[in-house]
Every structure is written in structure tokens, then in C-alpha cells.
Image (cartoon, rainbow, N blue to C red):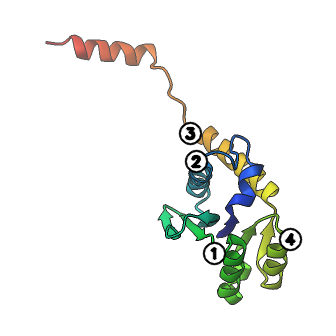
Amino acid sequence: MPFIIDGHNLIPKIPGINLEDLDDEQKLIDLLQEYARINQDNLEVYFDRAPVGQAKSTQKGRVKVIFVTEKTIADERIIKRIRMLGNAASGWVVVTSDRRIQADAKESRARSMSSEEFAQKLARTLEKGQNKRSPDKAMSDVEMESWIKLFNQK
């Protein structure tokens, strides 16, 4: 399921990331990329306060990152995006705790999820993804003997 995410609204809800960090956006993007990889979801994340002339949109795997200039705010771009989806909005989830955006999402029939809820979902998903990875396991005695024999051959 695709998500539209209010990035600066989500950051304070995630342990280890602070809006005061110089790389707070990148930290969130990294977590979202891992989440998207695990769940095979497509995400769009919007950030405010891009430096003048630096507003841009980039694709990083399944995560589309949109930096909005100071002339507008991410909230307005998110609302515009929801409205542009039209009937397809019902297949999207909007992640924000901003009541205005939530109301617009509801009006457009998109699902909404609070930033707190998504932060918990993100943490559970990342933890589940870590548990699925097989840890490096030690070789058995038989495997070790086999390697020793192989390397001792001339």
C-alpha cells in the first residue's frame, strides 16, 4: 500500500532522531527505505524548508523524497497531492498528526494514520526485518575440519 508521509511531523515521534539534528531528514529517509524494502510499500515523504533553489524531488528505491521550498509548506503540497489522486486516494495512507491534513485525507477517502501510530509500525517492521536476517553462525566442527584439510593441501 502506498503512503504519503509528513516528514517533519514524523521525525519527533521516532526515537534517536531529533528535528535539531543536521541530518534528521536523511536519518528518516534511511529508516523509510528499510521499511519500504521489507514491506514492499511505496512511500512519498514531504519535508518543509528546503533552501531557496533547492526544492526537488528524488527517488530513493521505493521512497520518493520531496523537499518543499520556503515559499510554501509541506502541508499544502501533501493536500494538493491527495486531491490530485482523485478516486485513487482511497488506496493510499496519509501519515500525519496534522488535523487539517487528516480531514482532507478523509474527505478524499484516503486512509490516515497518526505519526505516532506509524512510528510504532515502523519500529515493529524494522525489528521484524532484523529478526528475519540470519545471523552469522559459527562453522560446525565437520565444516572446520573440511576447510583445514582443503587449505593444508599442496
> What residue is shown with label 1?
71
> What residue is shown with label 4?
99
Cα distance between the residues tagged 3 and 1: 44 Å
Q: Which element is circle 4 on?
A: helix
Q: Residue at x 53, y 70 (%)?
A: 55
Cα distance between the residues tagged 3 and 4: 38 Å
Q: How many neighbours does mark 2 have within 10 angstroms: few (below 14), some (14-19), or many (20 or more)? A: few
Looking at this rendering, what residue extends furthest in the left direction?
A: 154
Which amino acid type corresponds to the residue marked 2 in the rendered image?
Asp
> What residue is shown with label 3?
133
Mark 3 or mark 2: name the one nearer the start of the chain: 2
Cα distance between the residues tagged 3 and 2: 27 Å
Dividing the picture into quadrants, the one containing residue 115 is bottom right
Q: Nearer the viewer, residue 97 or 39?
A: 97
Mark 3 or mark 1: name the one nearer the start of the chain: 1
> What residue is shown with label 2?
23
Mark 3 or mark 4: name the one nearer the start of the chain: 4
Q: Which element is circle 1 on?
A: loop
Q: Residue at x 49, y 61 (%)?
A: 60
